[in-house]
Image (cartoon, rainbow, N blue to C red):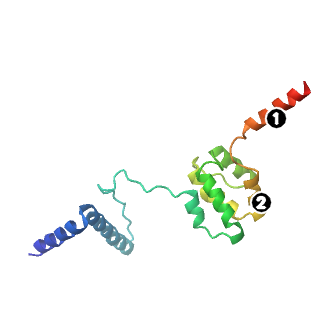
């Protein structure tokens, strides 16, 4: 009798919310129950991947999202957020080599992982601790923004050589 009532109740939930949502909620409840039991017994549980989550991964937080969550002084918040946006657009520290150079210059431990995303907290933690003037210099001079644009330099050399000839 109890099994029939359970099946009927679950059937109503599935019709109202869909199988995936009900299944996900049951897995979450099972995880909460298992976590509580594990905490009582001192035994942890390995997370299980359900059929509905296979291959789906939560996208990594962008630099802008992570910096927006930081507690930044009001005088530097806007400019640090600007750098974070440029980081995401790859116009500020576009390669890991630029990040490694930044870490050497500012005596920051280089991340073990060679990905740009792994460096966000170290880089922007360091930048957030800088004065507003120092951060502005990073922006104004395009420091750590990849290779220099050689076109204007080449044009200037060509103009100079024409005037001397």
**In what element is the residue under mark 2?**
helix
**Residue 133 relative to residue 60: left or right:** right
Q: Tell me how many marks there are.
A: 2
What residue lies at 30% left-to-right and 56% top-to-bottom? 52
Local crowd size for mark 2, using a 10 Å CA cut-off: few (<14), some (14–19), many (≥20): few
- The quadrant where residue 129 appears: bottom right
Residue extending furthest front?
163
- Residue that label 1 marks: 156
Q: Residues within 10 Å of mark 1 (few under 14, many from 20)?
A: few
Instruction: Give the percent coordinates (x, y) of residue 74.
Output: 69, 71
**On screen, 114 above or below 85?**
above
Q: Quadrant of residue 29?
A: bottom left
| Residue 137 shows in the view | yes
Task: Evaluate if marks 1 and 2 touch, with contact meaning CB atoms under 8 Å apart.
Answer: no
Q: Circle 1 sits in a helix, a strand or a loop, which is it?
A: helix
Q: Is residue 140 left or right of residue 83?
A: right
Name the quadrant of the N terminus.
Answer: bottom left
How far from the left and from the top, in percent, is residue 54?
Answer: 34, 52
Is 127 drawn above or below residue 30 in the view shown? above
Query: Residue 103's spot in the image, x, y percent?
Result: 70, 52
């Amino acid at each position: 009798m109890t099994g029939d009532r359970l099946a009927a109740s679950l059937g109503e939930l599935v019709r109202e919310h869909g199988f995936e949502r009900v299944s996900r909620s049951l897995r979450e409840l099972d995880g909460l129950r298992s976590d509580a039991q594990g905490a009582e017994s001192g035994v942890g549980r390995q997370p299980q991947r359900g059929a509905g989550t296979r291959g789906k991964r939560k996208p990594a937080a962008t630099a802008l999202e992570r910096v927006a969550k930081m507690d930044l002084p009001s005088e530097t918040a806007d400019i640090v957020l600007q750098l974070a946006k440029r980081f995401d657009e790859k116009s500020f520290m576009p390669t890991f080599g630029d990040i490694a150079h930044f870490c050497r210059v500012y005596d920051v431990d280089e991340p073990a992982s060679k990905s740009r995303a792994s460096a966000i907290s170290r880089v922007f933690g360091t930048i957030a601790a800088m004065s507003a003037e120092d951060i502005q210099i990073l922006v104004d001079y395009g420091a750590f923004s990849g290779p220099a644009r050689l076109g204007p330099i080449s044009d200037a050399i060509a103009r100079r050589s024409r005037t001397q000839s």
